[in-house]
Image (cartoon, rainbow, N blue to C red):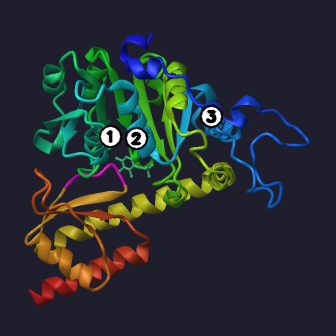
Amino acid sequence: MFEQLIRTCIRELHPYSSARDEFSGQASVYLDANENPFNSPYNRYPDPLAHSLKEEIASVKGIAPTKIFTGNGSDEAIDLIIRIFCEPGKDEVLSYSPTYGMYQVCAAINNVKYTAVPLGQGFLPDAQELLGMAGPASRVVFICSPNNPTSNSFPRESILQILDHFPGIVVIDEAYIDFSSNPGFLDALERYPRLVILQTLSKAWGLAGIRLGMAFAHEEIISWMNRVKYPYNVNVLTQQMALNVLPDRDRKEKWIREILAGREFLLNQLPAFPMVEKIFPSDANFLLVRFRDARKVFHYLMDIGIIVRDRSSVPSCEGCLRITVGKPQENEALLHALKEYAEAE
Ligand SMILES: *Cc1c(COP(=O)(O)O)cnc(C)c1O
């Protein structure tokens, strides 16, 4: 079904077959992979397809393991999708701006044209405009919802319009979906075979350090991703840690509740400061805030050890800082620092 969307060199690829691809059962003596026999269990290569981990993710998400790809962060999935579907020097990726920078960087690294449609009022997407930009070379659309750095979710209707009418691959990056009041698009996978959903353990699950990203899609797309990825892309430590943590959903839900309460708290407190000009509505674990003299505020905070993200040079985010919601005492520290800044002004 996807043949005509896949680059010719990928379609014709004879993928590397590792020792663990060729024998994946249980044995008592492993003499096939040139591993060191000592230092168990780290002497062994990981399961190339992370079967046990996918079983666990499947039970958390209610998606069949054959429809799950696991990678070294969602960044790996972004790069793979561009490499599988976009011919360098010929094809094109579409997205909105401002959005997550990796889509453009991965496109550039692969010499693939990147076209971004500016978001409109309230950082809302115009699906019609994006569809109007799409030509025969437009192979992939990246939609980030909730969107980084604007923090809002896109209306379901706009995303559905793109899913209904764009003839290529539609990627919805749901890195922040756990903080959102919207349900996300996992339940649309059956209806839209060219939909790829990206999620990650880096945000709500508190595991940015282990690098585990997930893609959910039609099993044929997943199988192309598995053919192109590095053979052992998710290491033993990461698979083990994710397996240990995923069953503890209560802990994750508790963190989410605390972070959402922190977001609410900041949302209530920040407008009192004279240099705060606007706080954009957030459906994520961060706030985009426009300040008078944003750079000055940024450096003031940095000098006392509070680091926020300076987005003031991003078109349409002029004067804005992106503030991640922290622990209660970290949010208090931020407010305290802003109070001192305001008093000194
Ligand atoms: C943080 C983030 C990710 C996560 O990337 P990982 O490589 O999984 O850590 C993906 N997309 C967006 C939009 C993000 O902000």
Give x and y (percent) for residue 262.
Answer: 38, 65
Mark 3 CB near ligand 1 (8 Å cut) = no
Q: Is residue 119 above or below residue 261?
A: above
Answer few, some or many: residues within 10 Å of disc 2's Cα (few below 14, many 20 plus, some between 14 and 19).
Answer: many
Q: Amino acid at mark 2?
A: Glu
Query: Which residue appears at 17% of the width and 26% of the height?
Result: 130
Query: Which residue appears at 13% of the width and 20% of the height?
Result: 132
Q: Residue furthest right?
A: 28
Mark 1 sits on what residue? 145
Most foreground residue, 298 or 25 = 25
Secondary element type, mark 3: helix
Whether pointer 3 and pointer 2 mark residues with C-beta atoms closer than 8 Å, the reply is no
Tell me which segment is drawn in magenta: 280-284
Give x and y (percent) for residue 187.
Answer: 48, 26
Mark 3 sits on what residue? 58
Residue 174 bears which disc, if any? 2
Left or right: residue 318 versus residue 330 is left
Answer few, some or many: residues within 10 Å of disc 1's Cα (few below 14, many 20 plus, some between 14 and 19).
Answer: many
Left or right: residue 327 versus residue 300 is right
Q: Amino acid at mark 1?
A: Ser
* 3 or 2: tag closer to the N-terminus: 3
Query: Which residue appears at 26% of the width and 79% of the height?
Result: 302
Q: Quadrant of residue 1?
A: top left
By secondary structure, the bulk of the magenta-drawn segment is best described as: loop
Most foreground residue, 128 or 38 = 38
Give x and y (percent) for residue 54.
Answer: 64, 37
Secondary element type, mark 1: loop
* 3 or 1: tag closer to the N-terminus: 3
Query: Which residue appears at 89% of the width and 43% of the height?
Result: 29
Mark 1 CB near ligand 1 (8 Å cut) = no
Q: Quadrant of residue 278?
A: bottom left
